[in-house]
Amino acid sequence: MTRKLFSVVLSAFALLLLMGAAAVPEQSAALVAEEESAVLDETALETEADASADELEELLEDAVPAAPSENPLELAELGDPSLLIDGQPAAQDVGKTQSGGITYVALAPMAQTLNSAAQVSWDGSTAAITAPGLELTAQVGRQYLVANGRYLYLPEGVQVMNGRVTVPLWAVAESFGAQVGWDGNTGTVTVIRGSAPIQNGDSYYNQDDLFWLSRIIVAESGNQPLEGQMAVGNVVMNRVASPIYPNSVQEVLAQKNQFSPYKSGALAERTPDEEAIIAAKLVLDGGVVPETDGALYFDSTSRSWAAKNRPYIATIGNHNFYG
């Protein structure tokens, strides 16, 4: 009886061993299946990532114009490294170009780069920029832009390049109170944003100087082109800046044998027109006609004292200018 019981127990134990051995391959097969599934899933994810990268590159190629040798992905990331705004490359749409040693930019995108709140409008001939504390207008073809009533002289005028209104970078920067620099070692133009836009013209221009300068301009050159009027104003301001002449516009005009309209007393009663006032403001804001830079005399006849005694510089309209 005991032997029979022992035989049953032994048979049961053997059966348990056989069942355990059968379970091991089943567990191993399950693990292998899970690993194969994970590999397949990872491969699918990599394929989807590759497809997404390809689609992104195609979109960027459409959005960022690039030269054949340039990578549009890099252009989108780097911007324009030759123009830094607060140390960061400017966006490509700022459209920086250089001509005659002057850096030009597209007005609207540059304005919005300097102040993200800037609003732009266009009436077919004039671009208007409105930003906190700033009103700016730039009319195509005019030789100046107006910022808060300040007149900034642009010898080459407001231009249209590649379908966009383009002006010198310095003029936009000055309007927004920013500072422009140049790194000669790297050929990089730098712009540092300012804390406030350009000072208002009503407080900037000396009203006494504006009164007399606009009147001598209209009296002496009211029939001349804008730069001819400015050149007359430049002569007056060159004398104001010279140590051998008086230090104010009125005192320069009052000098003996110099400006006859002032001597007669008629100048104070003269009413300047809009262009004479604009010419005076351009000069008072530092505008200098390049052709007559440094002139101290002008006349309209070859028989004048200046024509006989001073070096000739240039002629604008009906006036000759001398140093």
Image (cartoon, rainbow, N blue to C red):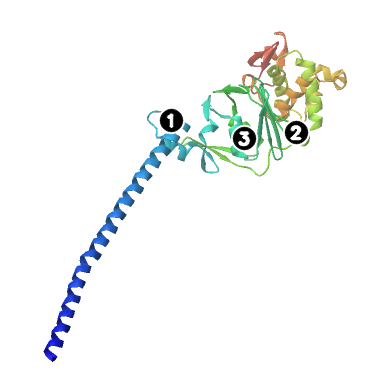
Q: Amino acid at mark 3?
A: Ala
Q: Tag on residue 121?
A: none
- Which mark is on residue 66? 1
Are there few (<14), some (14-19), or many (20+) residues within 10 Å of tag 1? some
Please give the residue where the numbered disc 2 appears in the rendered image. 201
Taking the image as shown, residue 40 lies to the left or right of residue 168, namely: left
Disc 1 marks which amino acid? Ala
> Few, some or many C-alpha atoms within 10 Å of disc 3 (few <14, some 14-19, many ≥20)?
many
Residue 242 visible in the shown view: no
* Residue position marked by numbered label 3 in the rendering: 111
Q: Earlier in the sequence, mark 3 or mark 1?
A: 1
Q: Mark 1 against mark 2, which lies toward the viewer?
A: 1
> In the figure, is residue 299 to the left or right of 167?
right
Q: Position of residue 260 (x, y in %)?
A: 82, 17
**What is the distance, in whole Å, between disc 1 and disc 2 at their CAs?**
42 Å
Measured Cα–Cα span from mark 3 to mark 2:
20 Å
